[in-house]
Image (spheres, helix red, strand yellow):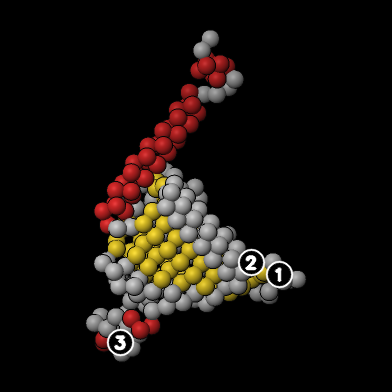
Amino acid sequence: MNMLDKALERGITPANILAYLSQITLGRFGLFWGTLRLRVKAHLLGVSLGRGVTAHGSVGLLRWPGGEIRLGDGVSLISSWRRATAAALNHPTRLRVFGPGACIDIGPDCELSGTSITARSQTIRLGRGVLLAPNCVIVDSDFHALWPPEARSADPGMERDRPVVIEDYAWIGMNSIILKGVTIGRGAIIGAGSVVTHDVPPLCLAAGVPARVLCCLTCATPSTGSGAAT
């Protein structure tokens, strides 16, 4: 009796076996080709990759002359719905910088899923082990001047750009937006669907539109008000 017959005898159906093999095959195929394409793109475009950086699916890299994109050791970039765990992805992971002086600096062991990061003139920095759930957006700019309205299409308003820092081991929930000038502290959690417009202290849970701190591990009691993190 071969191994397949033994598996079937234990109640494992052919459909279950096929489903398992499909996931394993597609996962390994996507990892191999995604990582290969990423490394070729990075080499051609002058993007710095650390050891063990991997990609599932195609990753968008756009680096204008004078800008920098740096990925630390063990960074994982997910652009495929087959690999994404929590949800389908709205778009592939996309990293874009405008030069000169703009920089995206992603620390070791970060995980990005369908993430869009755009640094126009400042630095967007992710610390070690930052987790970005599906479809998050991070920007350093408004991309247009606020006033006067009739000048918005022509005036970039670059003087208002501000850097963004997400410190070590922070976790950003799915569909969240991190706006310019924000620092998210070490180990903080941002609830799903949040729009972060102000700093979040370390080891705190923040959620909402705009996001506000709901509780902190260093606090005796949660802050008052409704809201939940996912």
The C terminus sits in image quarter: bottom right
**Mark 2 vs mark 1, CA separation in Å:** 7 Å
In the image, what residue occupies the spot 52% across and 24% down?
A: 13
Per the model, the C-alpha gap separating discs 3 and 2 is 39 Å
The one of 123 and 1 positioned closer to us in this rendering: 123
Which circle's residue, 2 or 1, is located before the other in the chain? 2
Q: Amino acid at mark 3?
A: Pro
Left or right of 211 on screen, residue 177: left
Residue under pointer 3: 149
Which residue corresponds to the image point at 34% horizontal and 41% vertical from the top-left? 33
The three-letter code of the residue at mark 1 reads Thr
Residue found at x 27% / y 57%: 45
| Few, some or many residues within 10 Å of mark 2 (<14, 14–19, 20+) | some
- Confirm whether residue 80 shows in the render: no
Q: Secondary structure at mark 1?
A: loop
Secondary structure at badge 2 equals: loop
Please tell me how crowded label 1 is: few (under 14), some (14-19), or many (20+) other residues with Cα within 10 Å.
Answer: few
Mark carried by residue 218: 1
Q: Position of residue 123 (x, y in %)?
A: 41, 71
Expressed as whole percent of the image width and height from the top left, the position of residue 48 reads 36, 57
